[in-house]
Image: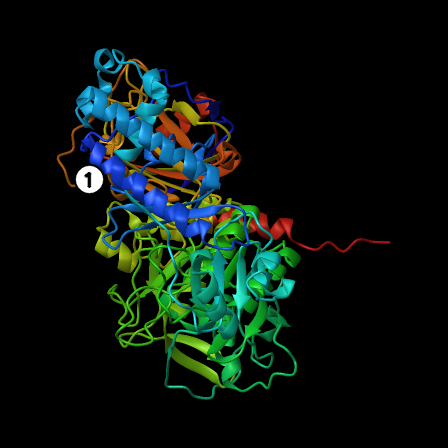
Amino acid sequence: MANNVLELKGKAFTQASKKQNNGGGATMNGKVTVSSEHLVFLKNRLQIISEYWTGKTNAFNGILISVYYNKIAAKSNRISGLFKKENSNFAVVGSKFNDNKDKHIITYYLDFQDIRDSIQGLEKSISVLNAYFDGQINHYKFENKLIMERFSYDKFNISKSLFMQIIADVSYIEDFNVEEAPEQIRQSIITLYDTKTDTIQLLKKYGINILSSRILDKLTVYLDSNQAKLLSYKAPYLISMAVEDLACLSPEDHILQYQQNQLYIPIPKAEPTIGVIDTLFDSNVYFHEWVDYHEMVDVNIPKELNDYKHGTAISSIIVDGPNLNPWLEDGCGRFKVRHFGVATGAQFSSFTIIKQIKEIIAANRDIKVWNLSLGSNQEINDNFISAEAAVLDQIQFDNDVIFVIAGTNKPNDKVEKIGSPADSINSMVVNSVTKYGKPAKYGRKGIVLSFFSKPDISYYGGSEEQYICVYEPSGKTNVAGTSFAAPWVARKLSFLIDILGLNKELAKALIIDAAGKWEEPTTEKMALYGHGIMPIHINNILMTEEDEIKFLVSDISEKWNTYNYEFPIPLIKDKYPFFARATMCYFPKCNKNQGVDYTNTELNIKFGRITDKNKIIVNRNNKQNLENIEKNYLYESEARNIYRKWDNIKRIIENIDKKPVPKKSYKIKNWGMEIKTNNRLDSRDGEGIRFGVVVTLKEMNNVNRIEEYIRNCQLNGWLVTQLDIDKQIDIYQSSNESLDLLD
């Protein structure tokens, strides 16, 4: 007998602001000795850059300058004194990594006066360094108050605090430069650096006239090949990122196609609706009554049979997939589809489709789950998110919707990385595996922006061992491709969201948790599989083994620390005989102009016992957000690679293969959960972000303790709901029945 998943409600998380850091002040790179020679080098570089911009007839008022850092720089390590801004992070307009992916290159938009002040600040700091420190200073001297306070800085017309901040800034900087994009010779979707200038007026000053319909957002524009070439020649420093507009539908295998007699399907009733954005749909197929079709391709464009194959096949899986593929019976039933045909054949304009998607979502707010199985043959860029993905991420932040996106297929053996829009951070990106759980030969690899874990999960997309059966205009067809893995995930998300009533954060976390189980994948595995292979049947997501307790909690982060210390985990002889894992998902605000620093908000989760000092025991020695910074210092690269800092999916997994030793209990017998919020730019970006957490407890002696846990929760004031599938379906059907009222 398996246990149902439990949903806990009724005890809201508490919100607490961050304590003020009494230490404050500048922090120098402990691995670097700053010399006057290096300061002279940087001063000369700034002078060259100042002359570069002085010699240009600018169409905007400021200058663009890139800072080459000597590491992956945390927000606290970035320039804060050298560029005299109230908060220089607000001057950041681009961010990328070097070729080795171990150092930041961050682009700032500044006033001319900022550069003049920086040059003067360096000159004064050089004088102080030569006069008082023999031309160099290390971390030991920098942190020694007795040394730093015995000198007269006023003599050089600089304050001690500004001198120290400039030295701290320089300790993280290798060089300054102006980035210039390579020549663009094809029609492109181009994102410009933010120069606080109207885009149409800005381009007009370079002889490029565009219509407002060619603007995707205030900084992203569509240029034809002549316009792109002209901009590359006249202002290469303005181009933050550029991708060729013409995208291709990644090739799929269509096998053993043959005509088929019409299959039987009942008339749709109150089933949930999933949105599909794809190629055209053939309204003559047997399940056409289940599909509300909207064709959005210009009526003057000629249509061919091939234009209807892919879209019709995708909708056939969502409507009737288990009937066509009994080996993939998922227990979710059938779904209605609202299908938007936005493309024909194998090639389409990404720019046009992006604009259409924004319009489609705005006009169809009743749909929560959207399937997008279109993808580019081009590989994603390591340093910036695609325009398509950025729009999808913004839509999902602004609206209560989730996209399921195919992980894209290899157009040839030379292409390895996934293509857009599979780099969407907020979406559920799906790769494909064979029937036996091996990576499909046509599959491509993540990761996104050199860090984010994409794909999210994998599922069966067809292979030589077992193809996926779909229905196309000509009948049943056996196919293979990531396109045909994604709709199965959309079905399960819709079941969890539309039928069970879970929010999208919990639904996403449940699927990822069920796919990942107790395994912590390597980076290589994650690039292929994501967090794991999604189970076939919904029961394997909503039910657990007898010795496991799985519960869901969800709330909204409003302040730095969102916490709840009232999880009554069963005690046996004053110890906890449980292994634990937790999966958290959230949908952050993103900013594509920040390059590799794409997500604005970081939520970090801690879950576990509470010590006698009222601290949650840190998982895997995770030192993020601990209050004693000096004792608990953590390099930014470690935080990103080990603890998935800035990733919007967090997983804490205990090793269940180790010797089972029950955990010690403390005075406080409940366990606690803390969600710490950090923001890159605006402190308000993290306000109102909803998170969903799935916690699994595995009893070390294979004992079923779920009844005890339910009782403990109820005694502690929790409202406990068992997610019984049959009961939830009955509730959904009853609430959606149409009533015949008498006059």
Does residue 118 sit above or below 223 in this rendering? above
- Label 1 residue SS: loop
Q: Which residue is mark 1?
A: 656
Kindly indicate the quadrant of the structure image that contains residue 159: top left
Amino acid type of disc 1? Ile
Residue 178 drawn at (x, y percent): 37, 52
Residue 64 drawn at (x, y percent): 44, 48
Residue at the right extreme, as displayed: 743
Along the line of sight, the residue nearer the viewer: 630 or 203? 203
Looking at the image, can residue 37 be seen? yes
Residue 275 drawn at (x, y percent): 56, 62
- Determine whether, in the image, residue 683 is placed left or right of residue 125: right
- Determine whether, in the image, residue 353 is placed left or right of residue 453: right
Along the line of sight, the residue nearer the viewer: 531 or 324? 531
Along the line of sight, the residue nearer the viewer: 530 or 169? 169
Label total for image: 1
Does residue 236 sit above or below 138 in this rendering? below
Kindly indicate the quadrant of the structure image that contains residue 698: top left
